Image: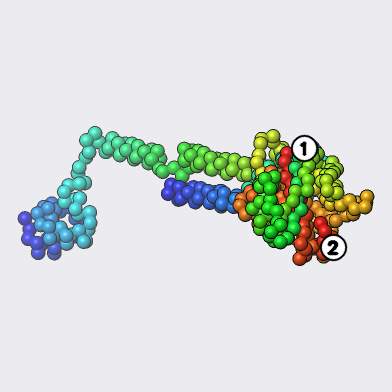
Amino acid sequence: MTRRLLFALMALALISGTAFADAADAGKALSVRTFQFKFKEADKAAVVIKPLVSGEGSMAIQPSSNSLVVTDHPDNLKAIAAALQQYDAPARNVRLSVRLVGASRVDPSIAVEPGAELKDIATELSLLRFNSFERLGETELQGKEGEPGLLDLASGYRAEFKFGEYDPASDTIRLNDFRLSRLQNDQLVPLYKATLNLKLGRTVIVGATKPQGQRALMIVVVAKR
Amino acid sequence: MISCRDFRAGFTAATADPKMLEHVRGCDLCLDHAAAIDPDIVFRAIGGGELVPPGGVDAFVDDVMRQVRVRSAANVVNVPSRFSWRKLSAAAAMAAGVTGAALVYHYERGTRVIPPPVTDRPAVVANLTTKPVVETYESENATIVEVPASEPGGAQVVMIFDESLPSDL
């Protein structure tokens, strides 16, 4: 009887040990989830979640079913699932509030400090080497993801772009092909072209100047839903 | 009663001489001497050959044999069983329990692997990654400086220093 009891205990210890070993490995194990998209394309979704996938994780796009198969640690998969859930939504409305500010470095006696309309960004402007600020104009624009946008900023400046997709991982909206131009002699002269990422609800000041230049053009923009 | 010397001189195996037997009953030393020659002398000395059990020899033998059978039967009943259904069932229950638990555990692990549908529960995902404000810029002669915000959530300043820009911006 003692031998049988010993045998049973050994078997129990063996099975329990296996179970506990598996439990210990559970946190390190990789899981697989498939995400199918209704509104967005799987390949673009892959780009969105790429920063969230761990070094051991991987993903595969299935164009036929417009789905994405992601392999990663369970904790990462939760974050990825939440990000994709926000991402796979109908085109969102985005509202842009834009101010155009001319900055220059002049003799302090004639310098113009930021007025009340620029009070919210006075601290940030003071960090720059310019000491005189002038509001050139402001405008608002409402659009949707994927739609083109046009900002007529007065003072001859104009910005054309295309609303990109909202990225839930960074909570940003992308402005693709952002082209800033200036009207000179009845002609639009391009100044620069860029791709901008605007964090929702956050004020972003994009300044442009020549190196060692005495003047700069500041675009102060806030993107909101 | 004969003397010890006469006893030892005249003692022979299987003797039934009453004098010899009487001497043996009274002298332990000579009993030992005689038993070395004839072990049965002990029984003959006490008159064993003439004893008859109560009820006769046959009845005595039957009684003895009955006791032997009873003891044998008792031994059969009491022999420790090498095969016990109770122990086997307990071991089976224990093994089934442990195996079941292990299977349930593995099954639950397996269900995590099965891709579940994306649920509609609300989720808040933000600030998991950061992106540069100016992701691309179409000029080779530009330097882009992203100034850290002075306070969390404060305005973000990005300066583009581009040689190709006009000086009268």
Write down the residue under mark 1: A93
Q: Amino acid at mark 2?
A: Ser
A25 left or right of A69 in image = left
Q: Quadrant of residue B59?
A: top left
Foreground: disc 1 or disc 2? 2
User: Looking at the picture, which amino acid does disc 1 mark?
Assistant: Asn
Name which residue lies at 22% across and 38% down. Answer: B53
x, y percentage for residue B108? Answer: 62, 41
Choose between B30 and A100: the one closer to the eye: A100
Total numbered circles = 2
C-alpha distance separating marks 1 and 2: 35 Å
Q: Residue at x 75, y 48 (%)?
A: A135
* x then y, percent, for residue A72: 68, 50
Q: Which mark is residue B164?
A: 2
Answer few, some or many: residues within 10 Å of disc 1's Cα (few below 14, many 20 plus, some between 14 and 19). some
Q: Chain of mark 1?
A: A
User: In the rendered image of this protein, does residue B43 appear above or below residue A141?
Assistant: below
Residue drawn at (82%, 61%) of the image: B167
How busy is the neighbourhood of tag 2: few (under 14 within 10 Å), some, or many (20 plus)? some
